Amino acid sequence: MRIAVASSSDDMHTGRVTRLGTCSQLLLVDPATMAYEAIPVSTAEQGRGAGIRMVTLAAGHGAEAIMTSYVPPRMEAALQGSGIDLVTGVEGTVREAIEEYAGQSRQRAPEEAASLTRALRQSFRQFGRMLPVLLGVMLLAGLLKAFISRGALTSVFSGHPVTDTLWGAVSGSIFGGNAVNSYVIGGALHDAGVSLFAVTALIVTWVTVGLIQLPAEAAALGPRFAILRNALSFIVSLGVAMLTVLVAGWLS
């Protein structure tokens, strides 16, 4: 790793960190060995646009970080997506700045490892909470195939777009719950010959209309709001389901 430092001289022990646009030297330092290379900056390269030229120069020499006392906010924003770590507000000699940067990097390593460990633990806990739901979905799909015959389904879902959409919406409104369950039930119904109109309406109302949760919703938000929201959601779901299937068929 190499760090580019805007310096007032070619000696990292005495040179002080300066602005990119006014530095007389650009020091490329290896923080592991403290070996460095000084690149002189002529007065012709200073002034307007010098900061961008210094960044280009540092990147061309393989620098992964740039240290300077100050850069304009516009330039700092432009560098955020460059992949180069920009460290501003640095004071003191170049060596002091490098040593401080290296110390902070060593300190961040265990913190990042701890953050990764916490993220993994949280992921496992979330998976553990989802496992009963996934097992319930598998059981539900098996029961649906075992106890509901194709003839019983076709007697309700005749294949007509309007009636199938209506019955699918009614079923989803009654049996609402976890959204994952609706996908499994919808897939099982479609495999059994139920039209996409009914399946789509069931999925839409499953997550938007909840007759089982209606008493709790009414207690929390008021009966008038709960009834109106569920009624409007039911009506809108009919149009959404039919439009979705028609558009999908047209696109295919």
Image: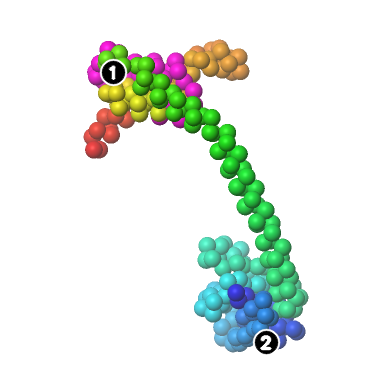
The amino acid type of the residue labelled 1 equals Arg
Which range of residues does the magenta coloring cover? Answer: 155-183
Q: What sort of colour scheme is used for the picture?
A: rainbow
Q: Residue 112 in magenta?
A: no
Q: Mark 2 or mark 1: which is in front?
A: 1
Where is residue 10 drawn, in percent x and y? 67, 87
The amino acid type of the residue labelled 2 equals Asp
- In depth, the one of 184 and 167 nearer the eye is 184
In primary-sequence order, the first of circles 2 and 1 is 2
With 84 as the anchor, is 16 left or right in this view? right
Where is residue 63 drawn, in percent x and y? 57, 75
Where, quadrant-wise, is the N terminus in this rendering? bottom right
Where is residue 105 drawn, in percent x and y? 68, 66
State whether residue 114 is above or below residue 155: below
Q: Are marks 2 and 1 in contact (CB under 8 Å)?
A: no
State whether residue 26 is above or below residue 242: below
